[in-house]
DNA sequence: GCCAACGTTGGC
DNA sequence: GCCAACGTTGGC
């Protein structure tokens, strides 16, 4: 089980959109960056993913689960691009903002801070647990 | 809306 | 294979 973070602009596709898809979830399509794609290829079913709102909000708002491994991105015929499928698991009682993350020394090494343009990135277990607690989840395991 | 950082493209 | 030009992301 590994942990990840994926970004989306909420006016394009936000947490509410993801949740509206229900348990069947949907493909995390549209990624056109090799590093981000490689991270999705490294995911396995059951991995957990933070949903981050970029641009508007700039905060981690919820937790998703990987329900299908990387496969051809349905929004393109280009075989270079594939994506996993994810489903919404739980909304954070309190979103964790980028400002808060930057102000937290234990989270200073997150890719969110260090390579701010990477839209699919790994999250360390300690970081995951801490953010869950900061977000108001008393239990870490979903 | 601006722009810094970064990734990609394409000419050479 | 280098690198200049260009495009995109995302914080501010």
Image (cartoon, coloured by chain):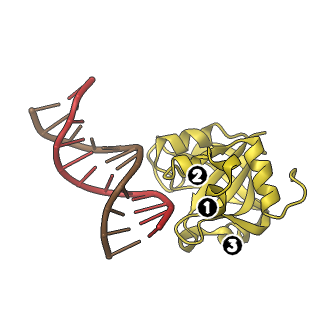
Chain colours: A yellow, B brown, C red
Q: Nearer the viewer, mark 3 or mark 2?
A: 2
Give the spatial CA distance, label 3 vs label 2.
22 Å
The residue tagged 3 is A16
Disc 1: host chain: A
Mark 1 is surrounded, within 10 Å at the Cα level, by few (under 14), some (14 to 19) or many (20 or more) other residues, namely some
Q: Are marks 3 and 2 on the same chain?
A: yes
The residue tagged 2 is A112
**x%, y% of residue A84?**
64, 48
Tags 3 and 1 touching, CB below 8 Å: no
Q: Earlier in the sequence, mark 1 or mark 2?
A: 1
**x%, y% of residue C9?**
46, 57
* Secondary structure at numbered mark 1: helix
**x%, y% of residue C1?**
27, 23
* Secondary structure at numbered mark 2: helix
Disc 2: host chain: A
The residue tagged 1 is A98
The mark found on residue A124 in the picture is: none
Give the spatial CA distance, label 1 vs label 2.
8 Å
Q: Earlier in the sequence, mark 3 or mark 2?
A: 3
């Amino acid at each position: 089980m590994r942990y990840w973070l994926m970004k989306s602009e909420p006016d394009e596709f936000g947490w509410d959109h993801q949740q509206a898809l229900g348990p069947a979830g949907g493909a995390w399509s549209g990624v056109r960056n090799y590093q981000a794609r490689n991270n999705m290829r490294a995911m396995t079913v059951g991995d957990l993913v933070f949903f981050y709102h970029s641009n508007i909000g700039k905060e981690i708002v919820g937790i998703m689960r990987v329900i299908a491994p990387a496969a051809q991105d349905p929004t393109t015929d280009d075989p270079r691009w594939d994506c996993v499928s994810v489903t919404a698991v739980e909304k954070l009682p309190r979103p964790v903002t980028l400002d808060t993350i930057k102000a937290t020394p234990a989270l200073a090494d997150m890719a969110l801070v260090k390579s701010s343009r990477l839209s699919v990135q790994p999250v360390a277990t300690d970081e995951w647990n801490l953010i869950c607690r900061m977000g108001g989840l008393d239990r870490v395991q979903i």
